[in-house]
Image (cartoon, grey):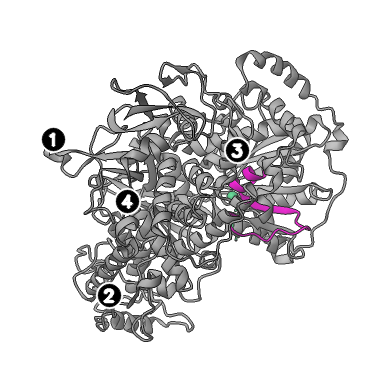
Amino acid sequence: EDDEGQEEESKDSPSEDDSSEEECSDEDVKRDEGEEEEKVAAFSEVRGEEEKEEEKEKEGKTEKPSCSKEACQPAVFVPVDRLAEIQEARLKLPVLAEEHVIMEAVRENPCVVLCGETGSGKTTQVPQFLYEAGYASGSGIIGVTEPRRVAAVSMSHRVATEMNLPTGVVSYQIRYEGNVTDGTKIKFMTDGVLLKEIQKDFLLQRYSVVIIDEAHERSVYTDILIGLLSRIVPLRNKRAMPMKLVIMSATLRVEDFTQNQRLFPAPPPVVKVDARQFPVTVHFNKRTAMEDYTGEAFRKTCKIHRMLPSGGILVFLTGQAEVHSLCRRLRRAFPYKPNRECTEGEDRAQGLRHFTRKQRKKPAALPRIDLDNYSALPVEEGDEGDDEEEEDGDEVSDLDLGDNPDDYDEKSDPSIPLYVLPLYSLLAPEQQAKVFRPAPAGTRLCVVATNVAETSLTIPGVRYVVDCGRVKKRFYDRVTGVSSFKVTWTSQASANQRAGRAGRTEPGHCYRLYSSAVFSDFSLFSEAEITRRPVDDLVLQMKDLNIQKVVNFPFPTPPSSEALAAAEQLLVSLGALEEPPREGRVIDLKRARLSCPITPLGRAMAAFPVSPRYAKMLALGQQQDCMPYVIAVVAAMTVREIFDDLDRPVAKDEDGEKVGQRRARLAQNKRLWAGQGQSLLLGDLMVMLGAVGACEFAGCTPKFCEENGLRYKAMLEIRRLRGQLTNAVNAVCPDVGVFVDGKMPPPTPTQVQCLRQVVLSGLGDHLARRVQSEELLDPKWRNGYKTPLLDEPVFIHPSSALFKTLPEFVVYQEVTETTKMYMRGVCAVEADWIPKILPQYCHFSAPQENPGPRYSPDSGRIRCHCESTFFRVGWKLPSVEMD
Ligand code: CDP
Ligand code: MG
């Protein structure tokens, strides 16, 4: 499960971005009045149907911008002094032929859509055209948004190199890092970063042009940005502060943007770049589809490498683990030794050497444990600590198609080495950059990638594409929010994009690991992400922009009204939105027409760069000096999977033993981190807290993480997030003055109890109650939990700290469906907290024998003794005193 969702993780959400320290300045809290009006004006349609007509009239006027045409046209031409070889390479790009047409369209229109095949030069060249045309010579700069961090970083480097300008002129900004300076003229960023900037400056006055790149990917934040910019651009032009919007897409399917009356009443012009694409011969598999597509990809790649003329190979798989597994197998089959050039003879010899069994490694010693700081002490020097990639024990011997790499040393096969590189979103940038450099002489390039190579990045020299036809996506149940990762077939459009990667420089071949019949069953296009996921974070961010009727927002593809209603409902119960009028006891969202205004708590929550449930925890975290722990727990919950993946299938040989050893050690650590008594009741969140605490005590080194089964990358991310959340908390509540030192002492029992209550307040809709023995009608409910939303039982995972405890009431972070429905991130709560902390979910009734309301002289209030039940399911809860 280690890599699940990591493709998604790479996308920066605005709630996760950290563009700068000033992020949560006072400005954020006390909002500027004038700006407020502006936002309302731009989105007056979201306030109510009746105002719509009036607005249309107004918009009609804005079509003739009050600024003169000259004002929109930058006067200066800014020459760029490129190196001759760069200039030569540029001239070969199809987009260069259209420079004039593109710039003309941009000059004449506030918004332009640009379509062109991947690799035609959109991302690297269009910002340069705009720069040369003087769009960055005034005070405004050129902003380019990318849905993926990889692309933002690598494209800024590429453009900086091409333009040969002083450092800092072309920069990037992603979630945690950036190199933006005062002199920046072209800024590449993730879509989330720009969305966050809109919250600070609705008119985006820093920008003269915004380019929305990879619009075809239809990422949620890209979609929202387009919706927002469709209003911001006319507003800017009306105020004689002209601004241009360029939407760039790799496919021609742009109707969602152009034929969308609500988005752009006047359809923007579409400029099409004719890419010079060489023919790609597509080869389908005869067999419909293989279960083991990684194995099939391995065999196909081996065949291509042995039998076909030179040219790079690009393999598409679905996730990080698969990518690494295939890379290992290919490296074993065709080893390449860096630092010296391999001759063909040597290569064979190396292959032989490689296939002799590896030396059995001495099993690692178990670490000593220091109980004072819940930390596993570092293992003694020389025990292990090799940074070498762990072998996952793929068994190569069961291949039967003559592609068995064990055979290569027997055959007289003079294969040249294969230069194998992985490529996926979370790969370290310097590793990613390798794919753009030429492969070492005497080798063939082979890139094994996830769909990041589909359109965002163009890898030079690829002539063969191997396509597994699948993609890994996260699916959510619309009602219950239960998520699962599924590998599904991709769309025809995506498959064709993948094939197209083979024909960039010369005619190529694409090997599809599925039959043409399967292909014809693919959906034509992939659906927009916004229709597939919960939108509570988006709704909160939009409400914070004073977009009240989110349902009227000009989305390129609107999310379902159920999803919007679910988000609004959640935000109301978290206290982030005002409660609409109640119809009896049930909040009637239909009557409220999805337009609950934001509350002061909601504003504070929107300032925290995490999803609303966690933001609520932060908002309540300042009790008993708990804030540093709340921050650590929230950071750990936000980063997907902090533990190393030990559940990968392993071979029975020495690797298996090593993995077994590590598994035992991790289990021991988890027990240790979970602790006893109170702290055990914090459950999996205590384990996370313990892991973070222990890792910080050890200085957060790769060695410590490796030895203790923690993902180093995750721990680093948690560390950065803790710093960022601390800044956010201090900015929102300056009087709190949290200081987070990396190292934290373990929480006291009182603090643990407080933490459990804070967690309950954020995860109130994720309450589950153990099925009582008298309710056990069906054996499938044994040890099961009932939740208000699901009909089926959910379970505590065997790896959870509370697996043996089985508390009566728990809250969970999420339910993921694997073999069963498992709750992740489980924490025990006490029944008598529920009516007090979650009154919004309870029904109260005064019991008969109750003497009735009585005045309490201490508080000066009238109090009443009530019995309560948990809403929908009617669980009886302890009676409470109510005001
Ligand atoms: O955005 P679009 O897909 O239209 O093309 P691009 O990303 O601007 O790439 C244009 C060309 O620049 C491609 O042929 C890439 O191979 C090349 N390029 C490169 O060689 N190195 C990079 N780091 C980025 C792009
Ligand atoms: Mg591009």
At 61% from the left and 38% from the top, the residue drawn is 225
Name the front one of labels 2 and 3: 3
CA gap between label 3 and label 1 equals 45 Å
Chain-order first, disc 3 or disc 4: 4
Percent x, y of residue 530: 49, 36
Task: Check disc 3 and give the amino acid type.
Answer: Arg
Q: Residues within 10 Å of mark 4 (few under 14, many from 20)?
A: many
Q: Residues within 10 Å of mark 1 (few under 14, many from 20)?
A: few
Q: Quadrant of the C terminus?
A: top left
Residue 603, label in figure: 3
Residue 218, label in figure: none
Task: Check disc 1 and give the amino acid type.
Answer: Glu
Q: Which residue is mark 1?
A: 774
Chain-order first, disc 3 or disc 1: 3
Do labels 3 and 1 touch, CB within 8 Å? no
Q: Is residue 472 above or below residue 241?
A: below
At 30% from the left and 46% from the top, the residue drawn is 823
Q: Residues within 10 Å of mark 3 (few under 14, many from 20)?
A: many
Q: Is residue 600 above or below residue 58?
A: below
Task: State the residue in front, 167 or 727.
Answer: 727
Percent x, y of residue 788: 31, 32
Query: Seen from this angle, which residue lies furthest front?
Result: 857
Kindly indicate the quadrant of the structure image that contains residue 709: bottom left
Q: Quadrant of the N terminus?
A: bottom left
The range drawn in magenta is 174-197
Q: Which residue is mark 2?
A: 408
Q: In the visual, does 290 lie left or right of 601?
A: left
Q: Which residue is mark 4?
A: 513
Q: Is residue 848 above or below residue 623?
A: above
